Amino acid sequence: MTINDRIREPHSVAVNSHGDRLYVSSPEQAVIMLLRPSDRLEPRSRWKEDPLAGVSGIQDFRDGAEARFNRPMGLALIDENRLLVADSGNNLIRSIDLGTRQVGTFAGDPLLTAGQTDGVGEAARFQAPSRLAAADGWLYVADQAGRALRLISPNGAVTTQGGDPAPTAAGAVDGPSHTARFRKPCGVAVGRDGLVFVADRGNHAIRRITSRGELVTFAGELGTAGDQDGLGAEAGFRNPTELAMDSVGYLYVTEPAANRWRRIAPDGHVTTLGGPPPRLIAAGPMGTQCLAMVVPNASGSEDVHLHSTGHAPQVVVAGIRPAALAVDRLGHVLVLTEDPAKRKVTVRKYAPWADWAEVASISLGSGAQAGHAFGLPRIQGMATDDHCNLYLADKANGPVWKVSPDLDTAMALAGDPAHKPRRLAVTPEGNIIITSRHALLKVTVPPAPTTVPEEPKTRESAGTMEQQKREEEKRRRDQELMRQNQEQGDAWQLAEEARRLATKRNQEQKKGKEKPARERKRKIQDLAKARGITFEEAERWLDERDAGVANSAARHQARMKKAAENFKGDEFD
């Protein structure tokens, strides 16, 4: 249905809670339009248009009842009485009172100065803000020219969410979010304690964001490629790409450039793992003891394997080349494949209780999705939350897609094509952490239900009684699987602790054996240098001396033993 076809180049739309008011921005016309249903019964295909703010065709700046805009773009309704506008050409965030239609400046410099300064209200600076998203009173702003994600609190304080997505802003700097720098951040994982880990591909290091919001280097030497194992900065990485964290805190890293994969213990000790390195790797959310990976097979294609505690590796699906991979809380493996010929991407869910058969799928293609027009998605990152919702990072179009647990609906969350999201992870609070260009972005997701959504139980929604029985059996298996996962997790944690202690004991024993050898080598080198002889001559001389000392000690011990025997004989006589 065509609502209105007279607005030139509409950019953004906001809808009120009743669905009877549409607010549309037009950068070309420099106006914000209000659309309402027509009073006429026929035809009902067109809504009435009402200029809400701005003067058509005049790109300018002015607050008040006769306001002016300069390429207004993003819109966000804070409540039923206030609409916020990303005034891109004026580098401002404007506010419209929907009752009086008065326009004011919400954040940014009234003198229209561009910049990336954080601050409160007019002290903040923006560079061509283009997209807005509101959640629980907080406002997320996509600063297009500044290539950063900005966050505005309910009291108007503007902050930058870590790093700088601008191509020229790459760097290798630890510290607070406003000074820290990445170089091509890629994989991201969130630990049980909520700490965020990032594979900084261009800096050959694994970075971590502390609970105070500071960026530190967790493993590897920042900016230097290497191949050695070790603790923290002693280890070396070469373009680390994918990250996955298991339920006991071990971090898995893929390095395609070095054709290997590594494991990092909670204390930061890096170990190289054997076997072919997986191209993709994914761990389930906390509470699941499984690791999914994409590995090459003998036919030149790839298989999806699942490794779980107490079980041999299983082939979930064979002969497939996934573009992304994820595991949900119930142990389902979700695989995304691309089909450029049909211009779509498809997510398929494979269930352990169905012997890894496909139980659900959803496709996304170019065209209209969730009320917006998008091109062919290019998904590089997938993650699930505790409620089995699936999130997809769309590098081509910008948004993060949220897909329902049953894979039946998809909606676009906040995002901007300029940010090119690559990988993502979900925090314990349900927020999304995204790697983008040279920055780390955060998207706050509205609160989700407190339980995993279940299948409807009514006859109308479930179909037949037989289908309801199958669904009940599926839920029972899911609950049993969760219980087994928890028990396996406890056993795995004990096994990992025992293995860690054994490794530590072996290392101490090895060091105890190596120390005398190192001391002897140093003695030989010192002797050779002092006497001007070769290392071999000094070693032979030292061996002969040690043998002579040993023989002398043996003779002395024999004499002492004989003397003691004679003494005893005299005493008895």
Image (tube, helix red, strand yellow):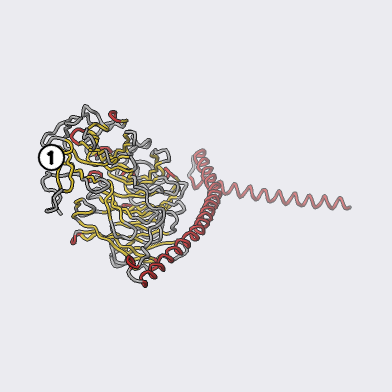
x and y percent of residue 277 in the render?
Answer: 36, 57
Q: Is residue 171 visible?
A: no
> Residue farthest to the bottom?
466
Judging depth in this view, the residue of 513 and 294 nearest the camera is 294
x and y percent of residue 491 in the render?
Answer: 51, 59
> Residue farthest to the top?
111
The residue sitting at 34% across, 71% down in the picture is 464
- Image quarter in which the N terminus is found: bottom left
Amino acid carrying label 1: it is: Glu
Q: Residues within 10 Å of mark 1 (few under 14, many from 20)?
A: some
Judging depth in this view, the residue of 470 and 196 nearest the camera is 470
- 301 is higher (above) or lower (below) than 136: below
x and y percent of residue 228 in the render?
Answer: 40, 48
Location of mark 1 (residue):
28
93 left or right of 57 in image: right
> Residue farthest to the right?
573
Q: Is residue 390 visible?
A: yes
Asked which quadrant contains residue 363, the reply is bottom left
x and y percent of residue 486 in the render?
Answer: 48, 59
